[in-house]
Amino acid sequence: MMDSYRYRKKSVVVEAFRLGRDEPPSWWFRALDEGCVRELPRKGWEQRRWLIETLEGRVFAQEGDWVIKGVAGELYPCADHVFTETYEPAT
């Protein structure tokens, strides 16, 4: 009998950039203009933080996190250590 509980994730190519490290793409600025992303006020020496509206609700992102544009145009943040374990540059 086939083991029907095991699945392999389909290979997809996403667009992404690292907050505070990379030049943001145009879709990031469009999301800011549309209110899908808001930069939060900083207190003292705090890192810059953003609130991103995702398909699962509001999620915080900070400098050093990656912002990924998914296959349906949705945005979501990803911690650097998770991103580097999950993604590799597309050729």
Image (cartoon, helix red, strand yellow):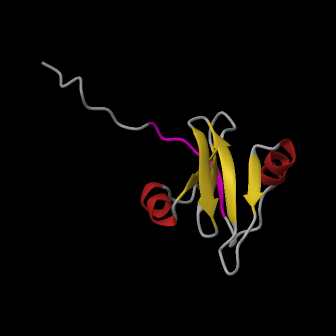
Q: Which residue is drawn at 60% across and 35% down?
A: 55
Q: How many labels does the image show?
A: 0
- Where residue 77 appears, as percent x and y from the top left, is 59, 53
Horizontal relation, residue 20 to residue 29: left or right: left
**Magenta region: which residues?**
10-18
For this orientation, the residue located farthest to the top is: 1
The quadrant of the picture occupied by the C terminus is bottom right
In-front residue for pair 39/26: 39
- Where residue 65 appears, as percent x and y from the top left, is 58, 63
Residue 22 within the magenta-colored segment of the rendering = no
The quadrant of the picture occupied by the N terminus is top left
Q: Residue at x 54, y 41 (%)?
A: 12
In-front residue for pair 11/32: 32
In the depicted structure, whether residue 40 falls above or below residue 76: below
For this orientation, the residue located farthest to the right is: 33
Q: Which residue is drawn at 65% across and 75% down?
A: 46
In the depicted structure, whether residue 72 falls above or below residue 84: above
- Where residue 4 appears, as percent x and y from the top left, is 23, 23
- Where residue 83 appears, as percent x and y from the top left, is 50, 59
